[in-house]
Image (cartoon, rainbow, N blue to C red):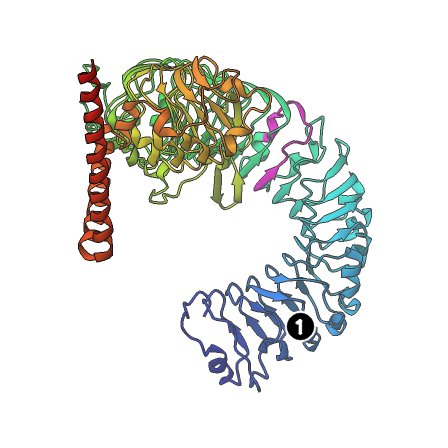
Amino acid sequence: MAFVDLTGVDDWVHTVNALPNLVVLILQRCRLTAPSALLHHNLTVLEELDLSDNSFNTLGVPNFFWDLTSLKSLSLLDCGLSGPFPDELGNLTLLETFRIAYNNFKGMIPGTLHNMCNLRSLQLGYNNIGADISEVIERIPKCSWRNLQELSLAYANITGEALTFVSNLTSLRKFDVSDNQLSGSVPVEIGTLTNLTVLDLGNNNLSGVISEDHLAGLMNLKLIDLSNNYLEFTIGSRWVPQFNLVWASLSSCHLGPQFPNWFRRQESINYLDISNTGLLGRIPDWFWTTFSHAGSLDISLNQLSGDLPLSLEFMSVVILSMQSNILTGLIPKLPRTIEVLDISRNSLSGFVPNFQAPQLQVAVLFSNSITGTIRTLVCRSPELRVLDLSNNFLSAELPNCGRKELKQRNPFTNNSSRVNSTSSFTSKITTLLLRNNCLSSRFPLFTQQCPNLIFLDLTQNKFTGELPGWINEAMPHLVMLRLRSNYFSGHIPNAMMELHNIRILDLSNNNFSGAIPGSLQNLKALIGTGNGTQFENPFEETYYGNFGLADRGQYNDSLSVVIKGQVLEYSKNTIYLMSIDLSCNSLTGEIPEELSFLAGLVSLNLSSNLLSGNIPYKIGKLRSLESLDLSKNTLGGGIPQSLTDLTYLSYLNLSYNKLSGRIPSGHQLDILKADDPASMYIGNPGLCGHPIPRECPGPPRDLSTNNDLESWRKHGLSQMDFLLGLITGFVASAWMVFCGLLFMKRWRYAYFGLLDELYDRLFVISVVTWRKWFRSTDVN
């Protein structure tokens, strides 16, 4: 009943227990709940039990299956079992196959296993055993050594260097101790295992040499993985192996400098990885024919040189990686089967005529010398998802597949908001990276045919003209839009603010003019209210297929990003930058108040423009901001005190503006640029206070006395508001006095008595003064 959804069947153990004659029970991946306890079980003849891939997520002990002493095969792969390995394992003396890998068991396997003399297959990997390999082997029953055919201890946190024990496992067919911390050399005795078909020692710290003696007796070997160790092959060019490999992963071993001649007879290879193995010189002609039926070939990170064959159409390869070599010439005609091509970081100059790859999904060609047109690559690869042609010498316009060139009559103004739908061609491209080429013309119309586009990078080209108003309609899923260092001009379209998923918007170093569009609150991803669209990081491009999970593309590359006052290289973390860069343009007007809605913004750069007005008072709401650059504008007024609320701020530049008043202090502002804090404010003669030398007159004042009337008007502190508050306070006070006199007799007597006394005093003073004045007049 494998793969049958049994969700909600809570009493499945008792149901099964009612079948006393059951011999085989397979419930793999049935979404079963954790097994309940059985006081007495009736499964006395059960020989095979497979409960793999069910998320029990419970302790390994107690569980009913440890009491099934009749079992010959027990599979509990990836069941979420935890705790120590149960001592009850010793009850299963008839076990031949025991598979308990991919769980959360911790600690040494119990010594009670010594009675399992019938073991044929033992899989304990992907648990945290955490011991020396010699101790682990001592716990495997010696009575089963001569019968053991499979031993898997991969990814089990095992250390040590004693591997000579393998010579005692004479029946061994599969030996896997990969992804541990094993050290030392590979024992030559491993070559005596004539039945061995799988040898996996990859991802350890093994060192030393691999000679012909290590491999001579392995006549049945089909899979070998020695990758990511420190091993050196010393095999003569005339040696002929007796095995015929299907899978070989030798990445980071030293095979060179000559191409290994013993590979020439491995015509059954389906997967070959000899990347970073020190190979020099030309790729031998026999390489392409010998491995013509291979599905995955990786010869990257070597120093292989020369031209490639003009045609590889006769091959069946699906994944071909040749990046970081010294290959020259043209990119050949590819096999019709190819889906992933990574040939970046070479010196290739272009494509052969009639280039086509109908199944190609990922084309990573950055850092070559490619010139000419890419029409055949783009228009004849309908399955293409990722295209990276950065750092080449492309100069022609991007093609418009499936139609004639669109009319150039005013299609780029903001009025042309609708996407031209005359083309029958629709591209599946999600990532288009074309930075650092010589591409010209206006904004590429080809992008109208890319409704799935997520990452678009046209940085450092020669594009001109205005941005079209259809960007948000043609590419609604854009996450990254980089147009840096081109010759774009005109206003930034309001439609740009409808890119709800945009995280990285870089329009810097162009000729844009006019005001920054409002409606910034529509940039939902930067606000933090995006719809959670899932997308693949272009720096973690991966391929899922028959050959497992493979890294492809820009995982070894980076993007140059101007942030925190310097050019920094970002790789896979670029998409988390959450930035807007509009610097080095001719933008005018004020900074929109809606900017304060972008609570997820990490970097904001509006420097080197013609912006005026005040810094938004609510800029302190950008609580995620780490870098803020507003320098080289004509901003005026005071610096908002709310800047002190930016507790993550690590870079600030407000220099060369017309700011005035006291510089606010507190929190992050007091520790920024500790070596030269005054440089953040230089070029603003109206500023005063720490950290610049000019002192402010009088004691520190709050915002209401520092900012001018215009700032008051903007932020709800106008003169009308002040007068209205004054009148309200006067009326409220008068009513308090009136009510007190009305209801409190004692207050009334005191109040009117005080008035009478005050009246009498004033009367006496006035009479005396009058008489004195007239008396002095009469005397004169």
The one of 532 and 527 positioned closer to us in this rendering = 527
Quadrant where the C terminus sits is top left
Residue 169: x and y, percent?
77, 59
The magenta segment: 270-287
Residue 213: x and y, percent?
80, 43
Tag 1 residue: 95
546 up-or-down from 700: above or below: below
- Is residue 279 in the magenta section? yes
Quadrant where the N terminus sits is bottom left
Seen at 28% across and 18% down, the residue is 589
The one of 271 and 347 positioned closer to us in this rendering = 347
Identify the residue at the far front of this view: 779
Seen at 19% across and 35% down, the residue is 763
- Is residue 107 in the magenta section? no
Q: Can residue 471 be seen in this view?
A: no
Q: Which quadrant would residue 68 be assigned to in this image?
A: bottom right
Q: Is residue 669 visible?
A: yes
Secondary element type, mark 1? loop
